[in-house]
Image (cartoon, rainbow, N blue to C red):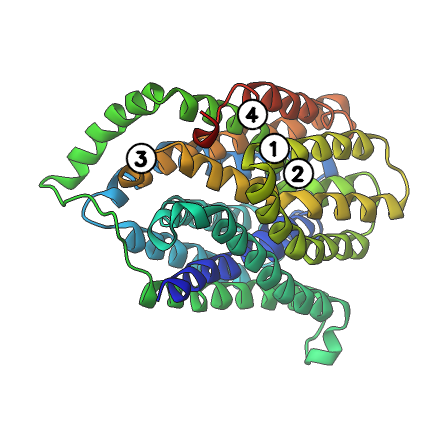
Amino acid sequence: MSRRRQIAWAFYDWGNSAFATTVMAGFFPVFFKAYWAGGLKATDSTFWLGLGNSAASTLMILLAPLIGALADQGGNKKRMLVTFGFLGALMTLSLFVVAAGNWPLALLLYALGLIGFSGSLVPYDALLVDVAEEAEWDRVSALGYALGYLGGGLLFALNVAMVSRPAWFGLAGSAEAVRFSFLMVGVWWALFTLPLLFWVQERHPAPPRDGVLRGALKEIRDNLREVRGHRMAFLFLLAYWLYIDGVDTIVRMAVDYGMAIGFQPGDLLGALLLTQLVGVPAALAFGWIGGRLGAKSGIMIALAVYSLVIVWAWSMNQKWEFYGLAVMIGLVQGGIQSLSRSFYARLIPSDRAGVFFGVYNMLGKFAAVIGPLLVGLVGVVTGSSRSGILAILLLFIAGAVVLRQVRAPETG
């Protein structure tokens, strides 16, 4: 039963990662620039894409702690996850009907899908303490990210084949293939939410309260104060806020950046698929690293690799370099996310996981406000899409400096 719960929980990552890969990192930036916003200048479409990402993330800053507080009251984690997950799936399905040139509607639906995706992660992360014992957290967290890379990568590979050879699938052209890909992602996401819905139960629910919404709003204030009282958790959240900004910005803007400096969409999508394939064994390997060297050491290794990625991305000119960067990112992207989640779980009380992960996700979404908008604004001001990339390096360095001050519970 325990293994079935863990696999059912991890399969939600298999499902929602299709949005992260096919939509957020892959087709939406390409399709937005070439199909929906084809009449705009490259720097302008980059600005609007960055603004859309930032607007959705800003709303999640406000919602994440409220979602976490509501999720903890009366065992609502699963209910909140399914609500936001199906919202994201529905918005993704709706992209299928958006006509060419209608970039405002496409951006709105994408932003709402991003809210569904991000909102579902608050209760999903918090459910880790319900499906696994503490000794299993690194492994189970890594399993989720590994299945996410595998599931998202499989569907993305099929979608890339559809776009590359639409006639093989009875489609009129690449544009129709991309639209059908959005449709498939929505169905995929909803379908693989069902195992969690049927088989995962909460083991640490707080008792239900009267006036849930009013109580949750009061809890937000109290819980932010409570998080500050857990010094190690607070320091980790500061470090996480700094370095996850760079991680999220790379995920959301890498394809747009590649197009802006002259690479072809096919090469960029191929590199993204390579990231997914490398990410499957790499995420599992980081689960092993967390068990042998400690989660904190694994995060530090990932930050060092990301710093090299930024310097290389700033100076790259050849197509093969983008593929090299894709491999490097695939080696550490799932690892830094899975070990951050499991490391943080050790720093917080299990019966308050929803609230603490609400703050965790809030800071993650706040980070995604700054990075994409920074890249877009610097590109518009300087007229160069390369100029903003080095600023991300400062975030990785600052995050590593703060993380050094965090002591893991097992080491005192």
Q: Earlier in the sequence, mark 2 or mark 3?
A: 2
Tell me, yes or no, if residue 169 can be seen here.
yes
Q: CA distance from mark 2 to mark 3?
A: 32 Å
* Closer to us: 81 or 412: 412
Relative height, residue 205 to residue 396 (above, below): below
Q: Which residue is mark 1?
A: 297
- Quarter of the figure with the C terminus: top left
Q: Which residue is mark 4?
A: 242
The outermost residue toward the left is 210
Query: What residue appears at the point 45 percent right and 30 percent down from the top-left corner?
Result: 363
**Label for residue 349?**
3
Instruction: Tell me the element at label 2.
Output: helix
User: Mark 2 against mark 4, which lies toward the viewer?
Assistant: 4
Q: CA distance from mark 1 to mark 4?
A: 17 Å
Q: Which residue is mark 2?
A: 250
Instruction: Tell me the kind of residue under disc 2.
Output: Ile
Query: What residue appears at the point 53 percent right and 56 percent down from the top-left corner?
Result: 143
Query: What residue appears at the point 75 percent right and 43 percent down from the top-left corner?
Result: 328
Q: Earlier in the sequence, mark 4 or mark 3?
A: 4
Place of residue 251 in the rendered image (x, y in percent of width and height, measured from the top left): 63, 43
The answer to whether residue 155 is left or right of residue 343 is right
